[in-house]
Image (cartoon, rainbow, N blue to C red):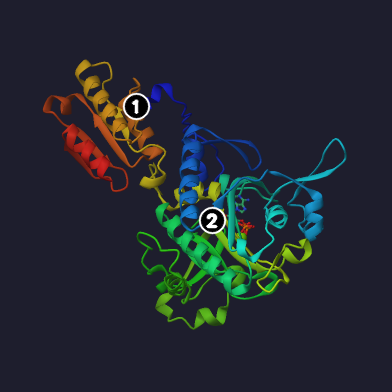
């Protein structure tokens, strides 16, 4: 993409609000999004690209774990929520709407009721189980204090998956698959998200985990054993048919103490050796949950067993805050100059700075780099504007693409360009070919 033909409304001064956290400020400065109302945002081209990249990684990892994608609407019927009893229970976070025929609607804050209704309509036999359906869709929660930009919005983008099983034992396997899928997903997104014991809700048990990215600006206070942070990342991912391996992985990651303030047990924490006690702050980026027959009982989502009896299915739900992740990744990965995008979610694979776009030899080399990186599928952002060098460098640092290629007159004379890795700041003068090779290898 040629910067001169693109739309990145970079603005240096965003707000004097001192409470504005780094990711919010950086997203405003780089023109990734625009607030339209409290907690409601337009995703401008740069932000939208990142959102779509995260969405795609989440999709690939859900698919790999055997979940099936679909799409449910944002608006839901109030009657459905009356069946589960949540229409009254949910409280003022739910945006209730009345249509012209005086029928009650709501902007969905989550989709358990709707997916249970779909399930009960079509699935009647144990033979059709297990089943895991998911979608990625906008949600609305009328948060009292929308803040931190997209991290606590009112309208936000969520991946939510729903599993259906015949009994608890089978539901546990579905849960373990999602647990592993989450490890894969966050690993690919370039963030360390730690699973923590979460409030199990009405039925108790141990099957509820929140995944938190540690960051000073996080809203949750977290307490954990340092050993949790030292568990190595999952690597290439899991074989989802190998249940023993999935169980082992989950045990490996949950055997040490890790909890948010809501679930914190001071005595258990005190029992950890003092040099391993970690108290930090975290951002909740995912939440997985087994809730048994909470919805299938009142909504009569039943299937026939092998023996011919009707039984309520056992359900679980699995959320990922896709739009919140954009902010969380920036919180975890930035410096005083701007964002440092992990390779997999970067809006562009590399930035090219043409220092003298009106000098023919310089422009020719920069055009060549642009053509080659484009052909290599690296989707580069090409700054061929006539802005001064300082602002050009500053802008590229701020946007934070993984690689920067600078084409200047002196280098061109010597047959080299400057290659810079944003994350480390390392710079090197190399030939165009070598620069392309390094970038395409990453
Ligand atoms: P929180 O405790 O942060 O309010 P929650 O526990 O109410 O979140 P869940 O119902 O577990 O949220 O939703 C699944 C995921 O959706 C969360 O883990 C989070 O990443 C994301 N999410 C929830 N609320 C918001 C919001 N207001 N803005 C952006 N993302 C959100
Ligand atoms: Mg939650």
Residue 160 shows in this picture: no
Residue depicted at 55% across the width and 38% down the height: 15
Tag 2 near tag 1, CB within 8 Å: no
Q: Which residue is mark 2?
A: 67
Q: Where does residue 32 sit, x and y in percent of width and height? A: 50, 36
Classify mark 2: helix, strand or loop.
loop
The span from disc 2 to disc 1 (Cα, nearest Å) is 41 Å
Q: Where does residue 88 sit, x and y in percent of width and height? A: 82, 57
The quarter of the displayed image where residue 131 is located? bottom right
Between 157 and 296, the one lying in front of the other is 296
Residue depicted at 28% across the width and 27% down the height: 371
Is 360 displayed left or right of 94 in the figure?
left
Residue 327 shows in this picture: yes
Q: Neighbour class for label 2 at 10 Å: few (<14), some, many (≥20)? A: many
Q: Where does residue 169 sit, x and y in percent of width and height? A: 58, 74
Q: Quadrant of ligand 2?
A: bottom right
Residue depicted at 62% across the width and 76% down the height: 205
Ligand 1 closer than 8 Å to the CB at disc 1?
Answer: no
The quarter of the displayed image where residue 266 is located? bottom right
Is 39 displayed left or right of 9 in the figure?
right
Q: Where does residue 58 sit, x and y in percent of width and height? A: 49, 51
Q: Please, which residue is most extreme toward the right here? A: 102
Between circles 2 and 1, the one closer to the viewer is 2
Residue depicted at 49% across the width and 76% down the height: 257
The quarter of the displayed image where residue 245 is located? bottom left
Classify mark 1: helix, strand or loop.
strand
Between 341 and 169, the one lying in front of the other is 169
Q: Which residue is mark 1?
A: 383
């Amino acid at each position: 993409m040629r910067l001169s033909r693109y739309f990145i409304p970079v603005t240096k001064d965003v707000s004097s609000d001192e409470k504005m956290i780094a990711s919010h400020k950086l997203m405003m400065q780089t023109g990734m999004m625009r607030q339209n109302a409290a907690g409601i945002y337009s995703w401008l081209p740069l932000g939208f690209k990142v959102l779509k990249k995260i969405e795609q990684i989440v999709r690939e990892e859900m698919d790999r774990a055997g979940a099936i994608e679909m799409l449910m609407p944002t608006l839901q019927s109030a009657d459905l929520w009356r069946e589960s009893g949540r229409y009254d229970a949910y409280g003022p976070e739910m945006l209730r709407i009345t249509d012209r025929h005086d029928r009650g609607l709501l902007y969905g804050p989550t989709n358990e009721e709707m997916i249970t209704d779909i399930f009960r309509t079509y699935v009647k036999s144990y033979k059709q189980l297990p089943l895991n359906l998911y979608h990625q869709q906008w949600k609305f929660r009328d948060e009292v204090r929308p803040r931190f930009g997209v991290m606590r919005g009112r309208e936000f983008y969520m991946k939510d998956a729903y599993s259906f099983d015949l009994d608890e034992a089978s539901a546990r396997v579905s849960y373990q698959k999602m647990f592993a899928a989450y490890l894969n997903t966050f690993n690919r997104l370039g963030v360390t998200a730690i699973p923590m014991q979460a409030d199990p809700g009405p039925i108790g048990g141990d099957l509820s985990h929140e995944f938190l990215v540690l960051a000073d600006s996080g809203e949750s206070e977290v307490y954990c054993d340092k050993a949790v942070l030292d568990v190595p990342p999952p690597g290439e991912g899991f074989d989802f048919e190998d249940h023993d391996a999935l169980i082992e992985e989950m045990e490996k990651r949950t055997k040490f103490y890790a909890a948010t303030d809501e679930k914190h047990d001071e005595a258990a924490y005190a029992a950890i050796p003092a040099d391993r006690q970690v108290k930090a702050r975290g951002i909740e980026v995912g939440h997985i949950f087994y809730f048994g027959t909470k919805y299938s009982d009142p909504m009569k989502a039943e299937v026939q067993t092998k023996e011919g009896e009707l039984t309520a299915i056992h359900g679980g739900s699995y959320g990922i805050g896709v739009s919140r992740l954009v902010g969380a990744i920036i919180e975890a990965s930035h410096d005083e100059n701007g964002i440092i995008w992990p390779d997999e979610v970067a809006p562009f694979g590399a930035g090219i700075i043409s220092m003298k776009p009106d000098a023919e030899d310089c422009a020719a080399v920069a055009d060549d780099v642009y053509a080659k990186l484009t052909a290599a599928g690296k989707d580069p952002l090409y700054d061929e504007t006539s802005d001064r060098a300082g602002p050009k460098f500053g802008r590229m640092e701020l946007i934070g693409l993984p690689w920067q290629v600078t084409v200047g007159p002196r280098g061109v004379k010597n047959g080299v360009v400057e290659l810079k890795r944003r994350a480390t700041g390392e710079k090197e003068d190399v030939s165009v070919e070598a620069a392309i090779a390094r970038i395409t290898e990453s």
